[in-house]
Amino acid sequence: MTVSTLTGSLLVATPLLDEPPFRRSVILLLDHDDDGALGVVVNRAADLSVGQVLPNWSSAVDEPGVLFMGGPVGTDSALAVAEVAASTDPPGWRECFGRIGLVDLDVPPALLEGAITRMRIFAGYAGWSSGQLEGEIAEGAWYVVESVTDDVFGHDPDTLWRRVLRRQNDQMAYLATYPDDPTQN
């Protein structure tokens, strides 16, 4: 079975997915193929500055300058997602889609200076084995929507879930007003 790639799309947690760590999460899919999928939760900023964990990279990341909780897998490792300037292919950068890719954090930051236009660092990631994500989408756990660069690097990650839903052209837009606690409705 050949899977149509969802790389570059956003997974937006539906209200049915109400358990941590994915409740109201927005995940950028960095890789998706027959073998499975890998992404990072882009709307979970941690209370830990990048400078505290990776001081060499603190000046390279965008505001708010904190580590993001990328997902429940491999939380002791870091993934750097970056946008590079047009027509550049800097050392230590691997394209995922368009101008968005992963940065090897072992590469000296000076080698990427001027090439990276925006960057965020994530502790951990979200991963799915072959067919697992497709099953979760079919069960109604995720909406799959188009991403825009500001989804990944925007300044207000806490409101991203609602903003992504609100810009949809169908009934998903109504879910942006879904109450935090439906029993209090």
Image (cartoon, helix red, strand yellow):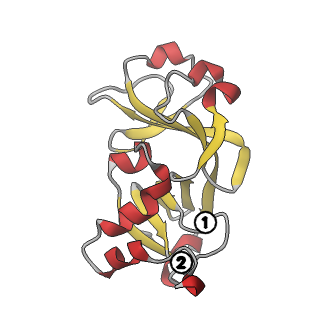
Q: Residue at x 35, y 56 (%)?
A: 147
Q: Is residue 106 left or right of residue 138?
A: right
Are the two marked residues, 2 and 1, in contact with CB atoms closer than 8 angstroms?
Answer: yes
In what element is the residue under mark 1? loop
Q: Residue at x 41, y 23 (%)?
A: 90
Q: Hey, what amino acid is under mark 1?
A: Phe
In what element is the residue under mark 2? loop
Query: Foreground: 150 or 88?
Result: 150
Q: Residue furthest right?
A: 76
Q: Residue at x 51, y 36 (%)?
A: 64
Q: Residue at x 51, y 37 (%)?
A: 120
**Where is residue 181 drawn, in percent x and y?**
58, 78
**Where is residue 21 drawn, in percent x and y?**
66, 63
Residue 28 visible in this rendered orientation of the protein: no
Q: Which residue is mark 1?
A: 22
Q: Hey, what amino acid is under mark 2?
A: Ala
Q: Is residue 132 left or right of residue 90?
A: right
Is residue 61 positioned above or below 8 on the image?
Answer: above
Where residue 155 sits, quadrant-wise, is top left
Q: Is residue 121 left or right of residue 21?
A: left
Q: Which residue is mark 2?
A: 141
Instruction: Kindly report the distance in space between the C-alpha atoms of the residues bearing marks 2 and 1.
Output: 10 Å
**Where is residue 69 drawn, in percent x and y?**
63, 49
Q: Is residue 23 left or right of residue 165?
A: right
